[in-house]
Amino acid sequence: MGVYPIRQALEIAEGLGLDLVEISPNAEPPVCKVTDYKKFLYEQKKREKLQKANTVKVVVKEIRFGPQTDEHDYEFKKKHAIKFLEEGSKVKAYVFFKGRAIVYKEQGEILLLKLAQELEDYGKLEGMPILMGKRMIINIQPKKKNK
Protein backbone atom coordinates (compact mmCIF):
# COMPACT_ATOMS: atom_id res chain seq x y z
CA MET A 1 0.00 0.00 0.00
CA GLY A 2 1.05 3.57 -0.39
CA VAL A 3 0.18 7.12 0.60
CA TYR A 4 -2.95 8.45 -1.14
CA PRO A 5 -4.99 11.66 -0.96
CA ILE A 6 -8.28 11.28 0.95
CA ARG A 7 -10.52 11.20 -2.16
CA GLN A 8 -8.44 8.54 -3.87
CA ALA A 9 -8.36 6.47 -0.65
CA LEU A 10 -12.17 6.68 -0.40
CA GLU A 11 -12.52 5.57 -4.04
CA ILE A 12 -10.22 2.58 -3.41
CA ALA A 13 -12.24 1.59 -0.32
CA GLU A 14 -15.57 1.89 -2.20
CA GLY A 15 -14.16 -0.12 -5.11
CA LEU A 16 -13.27 -2.95 -2.72
CA GLY A 17 -16.61 -2.71 -0.88
CA LEU A 18 -14.86 -1.85 2.39
CA ASP A 19 -14.63 1.17 4.73
CA LEU A 20 -11.87 3.74 5.17
CA VAL A 21 -11.07 3.69 8.91
CA GLU A 22 -9.00 6.45 10.54
CA ILE A 23 -6.41 4.68 12.72
CA SER A 24 -4.35 7.58 14.04
CA PRO A 25 -6.04 10.99 13.69
CA ASN A 26 -3.25 12.89 15.48
CA ALA A 27 -0.51 11.79 13.07
CA GLU A 28 0.61 14.12 10.29
CA PRO A 29 -0.86 13.17 7.80
CA PRO A 30 -3.66 11.17 9.52
CA VAL A 31 -3.27 7.40 9.15
CA CYS A 32 -6.20 5.52 7.60
CA LYS A 33 -6.77 1.87 6.71
CA VAL A 34 -9.06 0.20 4.20
CA THR A 35 -10.93 -2.47 6.18
CA ASP A 36 -14.36 -3.68 7.31
CA TYR A 37 -15.39 -1.27 10.09
CA LYS A 38 -17.34 -3.85 12.14
CA LYS A 39 -14.39 -6.24 12.01
CA PHE A 40 -12.09 -3.37 13.07
CA LEU A 41 -14.30 -2.60 16.10
CA TYR A 42 -14.46 -6.30 17.04
CA GLU A 43 -10.66 -6.65 16.95
CA GLN A 44 -10.22 -3.45 18.94
CA LYS A 45 -12.58 -4.68 21.69
CA LYS A 46 -10.80 -8.02 21.70
CA ARG A 47 -7.40 -6.29 22.18
CA GLU A 48 -8.75 -4.13 25.02
CA LYS A 49 -10.25 -7.18 26.76
CA LEU A 50 -6.95 -9.07 26.49
CA GLN A 51 -5.05 -6.07 27.85
CA LYS A 52 -7.47 -5.78 30.78
CA ALA A 53 -7.13 -9.50 31.57
CA ASN A 54 -3.33 -9.25 31.67
CA THR A 55 -3.25 -6.43 34.22
CA VAL A 56 -2.17 -7.45 37.72
CA LYS A 57 -4.60 -6.71 40.50
CA VAL A 58 -2.93 -5.88 43.81
CA VAL A 59 -4.75 -7.32 46.81
CA VAL A 60 -4.01 -5.84 50.25
CA LYS A 61 -4.80 -7.95 53.31
CA GLU A 62 -4.91 -6.30 56.72
CA ILE A 63 -3.81 -7.73 60.06
CA ARG A 64 -4.69 -5.87 63.26
CA PHE A 65 -2.74 -6.02 66.50
CA GLY A 66 -3.18 -4.38 69.88
CA PRO A 67 -0.19 -2.77 71.62
CA GLN A 68 -0.08 -5.62 74.17
CA THR A 69 -0.90 -8.57 71.89
CA ASP A 70 -0.33 -11.96 73.53
CA GLU A 71 2.36 -14.28 72.10
CA HIS A 72 -0.18 -16.91 70.96
CA ASP A 73 -2.29 -14.31 69.13
CA TYR A 74 0.87 -12.87 67.57
CA GLU A 75 1.94 -16.30 66.23
CA PHE A 76 -1.57 -16.98 64.92
CA LYS A 77 -1.67 -13.67 63.02
CA LYS A 78 1.90 -14.17 61.77
CA LYS A 79 0.84 -17.49 60.18
CA HIS A 80 -1.97 -15.69 58.40
CA ALA A 81 0.45 -13.02 57.16
CA ILE A 82 2.77 -15.74 55.80
CA LYS A 83 -0.17 -17.35 53.98
CA PHE A 84 -1.20 -14.00 52.47
CA LEU A 85 2.33 -13.24 51.28
CA GLU A 86 2.69 -16.71 49.72
CA GLU A 87 -0.57 -16.10 47.82
CA GLY A 88 1.00 -12.93 46.41
CA SER A 89 -1.05 -10.39 48.38
CA LYS A 90 0.41 -7.36 50.11
CA VAL A 91 0.05 -7.32 53.90
CA LYS A 92 -0.84 -4.18 55.82
CA ALA A 93 -0.15 -4.81 59.50
CA TYR A 94 -1.18 -2.24 62.06
CA VAL A 95 -1.36 -1.72 65.77
CA PHE A 96 -4.57 0.02 66.88
CA PHE A 97 -4.30 2.12 70.00
CA LYS A 98 -7.58 2.44 71.96
CA GLY A 99 -8.14 5.26 74.42
CA ARG A 100 -5.03 5.95 76.48
CA ALA A 101 -3.12 2.99 75.00
CA ILE A 102 -1.29 5.52 72.78
CA VAL A 103 1.30 5.76 75.59
CA TYR A 104 2.49 2.30 74.44
CA LYS A 105 3.70 3.58 71.05
CA GLU A 106 7.12 2.00 71.55
CA GLN A 107 5.57 -1.43 72.23
CA GLY A 108 3.54 -1.16 69.04
CA GLU A 109 6.59 -0.20 67.00
CA ILE A 110 8.63 -3.08 68.48
CA LEU A 111 5.80 -5.50 67.68
CA LEU A 112 5.59 -4.38 64.03
CA LEU A 113 9.36 -4.44 63.53
CA LYS A 114 9.50 -7.94 65.06
CA LEU A 115 6.78 -9.06 62.62
CA ALA A 116 8.63 -7.52 59.66
CA GLN A 117 11.87 -9.24 60.70
CA GLU A 118 10.18 -12.64 61.03
CA LEU A 119 8.47 -12.26 57.65
CA GLU A 120 11.73 -11.31 55.89
CA ASP A 121 11.85 -14.68 54.06
CA TYR A 122 8.36 -14.15 52.61
CA GLY A 123 8.15 -10.43 51.95
CA LYS A 124 9.93 -7.10 51.90
CA LEU A 125 9.14 -4.20 54.24
CA GLU A 126 8.10 -1.10 52.25
CA GLY A 127 8.96 1.40 54.96
CA MET A 128 9.38 2.00 58.66
CA PRO A 129 6.28 2.00 60.93
CA ILE A 130 4.24 5.19 60.54
CA LEU A 131 1.83 6.54 63.16
CA MET A 132 -1.40 7.76 61.53
CA GLY A 133 -3.93 8.90 64.10
CA LYS A 134 -4.51 5.94 66.42
CA ARG A 135 -2.85 3.42 64.09
CA MET A 136 0.79 2.50 63.58
CA ILE A 137 1.10 0.92 60.11
CA ILE A 138 3.63 -1.10 58.10
CA ASN A 139 3.23 -2.53 54.60
CA ILE A 140 4.92 -5.74 53.50
CA GLN A 141 5.22 -6.60 49.84
CA PRO A 142 5.53 -10.28 48.77
CA LYS A 143 8.84 -11.42 47.32
CA LYS A 144 8.86 -12.35 43.65
CA LYS A 145 8.58 -16.07 43.04
CA ASN A 146 11.35 -17.69 40.99
CA LYS A 147 9.83 -19.73 38.19
Image: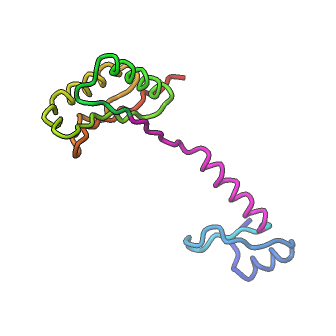
Q: Quadrant of the N terminus?
A: bottom right
Render colour scheme: rainbow
The image quadrant of residue 116 is top left
Instruction: Name the residue at the left extreme.
Output: 103
Determine whether, in the image, residue 131 is placed left or right of residue 125.
left
**Which residue is nearer to you in this view: 144 or 98?**
98
Q: Quadrant of the C terminus?
A: top right
The reply to whether the magenta stretch includes residue 55 is yes
Residue that appears at 20% across and 30% down = 109
Residue that appears at 62% across and 46% down = 53
Segment colored magenta: 37-62
The image quadrant of residue 39 is bottom right
Q: Is residue 55 above or below residue 41?
A: above
Residue that appears at 80% across and 74% down = 13
Question: Residue 38: image x %, image y %?
Answer: 78, 66
Q: Main secondary structure of the magenta part?
A: helix
**Which residue is nearer to you in this view: 131 or 100?**
100
Question: Residue 113: image x %, image y %?
Answer: 24, 26
The reply to whether the magenta stretch includes residue 41 is yes
Instruction: Name the residue at the front extreme.
Output: 99
Instruction: Name the residue at the bottom extreme.
Output: 7
Residue that appears at 15% across and 31% down = 104
**Which residue is nearer to you in this view: 44 or 71?**
71
Determine whether, in the image, residue 9 is placed left or right of residue 28.
right
Q: Is residue 104 above or below residue 39?
A: above
Question: Residue 6: image x %, image y %?
Answer: 70, 80
Determine whether, in the image, residue 80 is placed left or right of residue 113.
right
Question: Residue 28: image x %, image y %?
Answer: 56, 73
Determine whether, in the image, residue 130 is placed left or right of residue 52.
left
